[in-house]
Amino acid sequence: MTMMTPPPLEPEEDEMLVPHQELVAADAAQPMEVVAQTEAASTAESQPAEDPQTSRFTWTIENFTRINAKKHYSDAFVVGGRVLIFPKGNNVDHFSMYLDVADSANLPYGWSRYAQFSLAVVNQIQQKYTIRKDTQHQFNARESDWGFTSFMPLSELYDPSRGYLVDDTVVVEAEVAVRKMVDYWTYDSKKETGYVGLKNQGATCYMNSLLQTLYHIPYFRKAVYHMPTTENDMPSGSIPLALQSLFYKLQYSDNSVATKELTKSFGWDTYDSFMQHDVQELNRVLCEKLEDKMKVTNLRTVVEGTIEKLFEGHHINYIECINVDYKSNRKESFYDLQLDVKGCRDVYASFDKYVEVERLEGDNKYHAENHGLQDAKKGVLFLDFPPVLQLQLKRFEYDYMRDTMVKINDRYEFPLQLDLDRDDGKYLAPDADRSIRNLYALHRYKFDDERVTKEDTKKALEEQYGGEEELPQINPGFNNAPFKFTKYSNAYMLVYIRESDKDKIMCNVDEKDIAEHLRVARDENLKEQIGKDIYFDLVDHEKVRSFRIQKQLPFTTFKEEVAKEYGIPVQFQRFWLWAKRQNHTYRPNRPLSPHEETQSVGQLREVSNKAHNAELKLFLEVELGPDLRPLPPPEKSKEDILLFFKLYNPEKEELCFVGRLFVKALGKPSEILTKLNEMAGFVPNEEIELYEARAKFMMLYLWDNLEIKFEPNVMCEHIDKKATFRASQLEDGDIICFQKSPIPDSDTQMRYPDVPSYLEYVHNRQVVHFRLLEKPKDDDFSLELSKLHTYDDVVERVARQLGVDDPAKIRLTSHNCYSQQPKPQPIRYRGVEHLLDMLIHYNQTSDILYYEVLDIPLPELQGLKTLKVAFHHATKDEVVIHSIRLPKNSTIADVINDLKTKVELSSPSAELRLLEVFYHKIYKIFPLHEKIENINDQYWTLRAEEIPEEEKNLGPNDRLIHVYHFMKDPLQNQIQNFGDPFYLAIREGETLAEVKERIQKKLQVPDEEFCKWKFAFISMNRPDYLQDSDVVSARFQRRDVYGAWEQYLGLEHADTAPKRAYTANQNRHTYEKPVRIYN
């Protein structure tokens, strides 16, 4: 089986492809990334209807560092696209870049365009270091831009020595191929291919690929179906039951299958589902868990050892001395093999490299026991291969220049038939069992999360080899280079099945292998749950008793199991099927017929359950006599309606289940009032009001995951006691809530005097956990609020809780459900209407808000700009951070005047200047007239300092130069800056020796340390080391010191300052967090 990698996804920064939509990287909705899949199939989105339109575009952006706008667009180019950039990052510390459909607002309704495209930032010094990223996307009205929120670190982009910013100019390139596509909204995977896909939870493509791989190994699927479970297991808490449910749905469902139940059984939360992981790591962890689950304490199960039988092979690590008779062997088992891609043209080349002999000689001699250091050969050979051979392709490697993992898109071929006995068994150890023929066939499937489509086998394999794809030339006949794209979708996991084991592995899996899980709800469950966990429905089926029954067994056998469990004789049991209504609620729909009860459990599912749910849900009706002994169930005709009754107590604000009744369709509620009073414990003639409680579900389209959810809306209608039940449109399974009739003009004030107001309250009730923004991990207090509370309601309640006199001094920040952190921007004053707007984050609803208590009201604060300015004292070695808060239309001169009132100056006449510093370089001296509104101090340091007297009276040939500390990276020969940069005035004719003396005095460096320093004139990242006699001013030909891309004097020495761990704005999708399955 081949598994395909998603679009270039670099685990170090976990590059996610996202629509820009005022996102934070951690907030990003993730695309449907690729994974493992159907026999000769591909995505519906990758079926071109015609040759693509192609276009190249180069955008030269001058005065780049002076762009103050948050986002900046290029001109539109040939195919109607344009490039969108965020020069300071889209709320991340990375340069953000997207492809945008320029004319999206004017395109016809329902438009879509599919494009393969690459975006690049050109390295203007060394072309080979140009950063280019490829992807593909189907653009439409709701996603008219797509690209990379974390394209490259801002520190790299703004560092002139790296070559991306030269003369304050950045060069961006875009290459785009546009195709018309199949409409996947109407595409039916099951109808077209016989298969269904898995829904992506955000970044679970790697998991989906693995699950599809395992599902399509029938022997494994059969073993999962036979894994032991207990009657009380729930899918969300039992990995075996959740996996059985998932595989059953993949086998029988008509639509794509959700994986949330399975990830819940892993113990994962939303954060884990948005954490990109390594598929090999998940494979190993999952197999280890399943291996444990296939065992039962003190009992050997039929599936125990399945994982080993399928996937376990053995190899031997040996070291053999050349000159003495000594050999060391160590046998090891493996479930999968990691094969090198880099430098290997195909799988066979990788196996050759795997068993390559390493010579241990010279300084690397082997210490052999009793023989001392010896020349030796070291290597690996295989003792046996497993029936199912899993090969993990090493598509990622460490890039020392970028200090990160990067993806290898090199072409790498794999055969449909793999012969591991080739060349007289060169991969096998001498004592390997050679009676088994190690000839393997590739197990081929290709899916794209939810959609499955057919594709030619040769084409499917060719696309997964990687390398480059050459598209038709834009202008044939002209001397232009071919239009090439890196094939981002390439195989990263191969699954081969040994030919001699194929019949056993590819076995038939049918209904008899699948145990039926029957959930039985009873009156007792309704009493336990209604008013506690359930208000609008009858029961939570996950919290009722589950029975595991083989599908071929007759239903009467199941009834005997129920009789043993509950002590209710078979003849007194009547079971009802639950049905899903159009409003997406579940209700008991009809009792089983006598004929149906004679069928097998599996047949009953076929008759009753069109949706192929994992479990068959039943309601057990038992009639009790006055002595509470069971009675035979009453006859039920078409005119009989089974109704369920809930009682509401407005004084206690409680709802409870009081029972059920059969009524006649043409009967009237007035006829059962006495019975209802009896059930409630009221006097017989108590006046009561009846309401029909319905949950009307609104359809919500969650575009991020192409998922549809249903949000309940409360509908509680008063029932006319004189109208017939049929006229009130009541039917089997309906719920009636009743209460005492309210007393007119009563002095008792109740918050929720009737059923509708109470249910509306329950529906909107929300307990919110508030955390101090400075301590985002700790709950401070909780409040019960309503989702309909206005902004003013919420801050008023918080202010009251905190004892703050002015609610306007409360500032709130929403919670990011994916990163489990506060969102980067607080909620503006009255910026949202209701509490619900504060809590919703894409398709998730949080129950956390962060708060701050301000010293001035928020509306006033929002009219101000707050800047954090680091003041460097002229004579003391200290830096103090000051918060400067001024009206947004203020200037730099206003900032400096305000700062003067807060700092200690060396003299009353001292003048200050404000600098923009980024990654140890000075980028700007702010002019006094510049407005402060667009200054970004989130990633840039604002530094204030006194202007030295020596700089105030420069002669015509004097120079003001940048001076930076640096050291050289020995691996990459790259310059790394550190420490505080500064300006220095150099005089005409001044030698380096004289400059060094002034620098030593300024920095107060001891002689024994300073003598080790080297000095260099650096331009475009190239150091030219200076001698003491060199005239420094002769090297600096220009007086303009605006930008760090100019030349500077470099001070080369070791960085002795203590290192700080970098934590700010780390992307949540990293590979550093290991895969864990907690249950």
Image: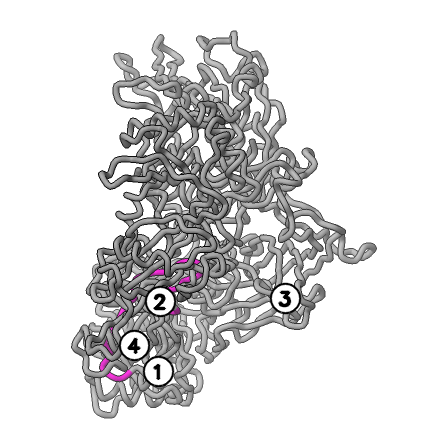
How crowded pointer 2 is (Cα within 10 Å; few <14, some 14-19, many 20+) is rated as some
Where is 945 relative to 86, above or below?
A: below
Who comes first in sequence, dot 4 or dot 2?
2
Residues tagged 4 and 1 counted as in contact (Cβ below 8 A): no
The residue that label 3 is drawn on is 101
Using the image as rendered, state which of residue 161 and residue 313 is in the foreground. Answer: 313
Residues tagged 4 and 2 counted as in contact (Cβ below 8 A): no
The residue that label 4 is drawn on is 793
Residue 875 seen in the current view = yes
Give left or right: position of 470 versus 976. Answer: right
The residue that label 1 is drawn on is 862
Which residue sits at x=29%, y=77%? 793
Q: Would you say residue 24 sits in the magenta stretch?
A: no
Label 3 and label 4: CA atoms lie apart by 41 Å
Q: Quadrant of residue 948?
A: bottom left
Image quarter of the N terminus: top right
- Residue 754 in picture, x, y percent from top left: 31, 68
Who comes first in sequence, dot 3 or dot 2?
3
Who comes first in sequence, dot 3 or dot 1?
3
Label 2 and label 1: CA atoms lie apart by 40 Å
Q: Which residues are magenta?
A: 837-857
Which residue sits at x=65%, y=35%? 40
Label 3 and label 2: CA atoms lie apart by 48 Å
Q: Which mark is residue 756?
A: 2
Residues tagged 3 and 1 counted as in contact (Cβ below 8 A): no
Residue 335 seen in the current view = no
Which residue sits at x=29%, y=68%? 741
Foreground: disc 4 or disc 1: 4
Q: State the SS at label 2.
A: helix
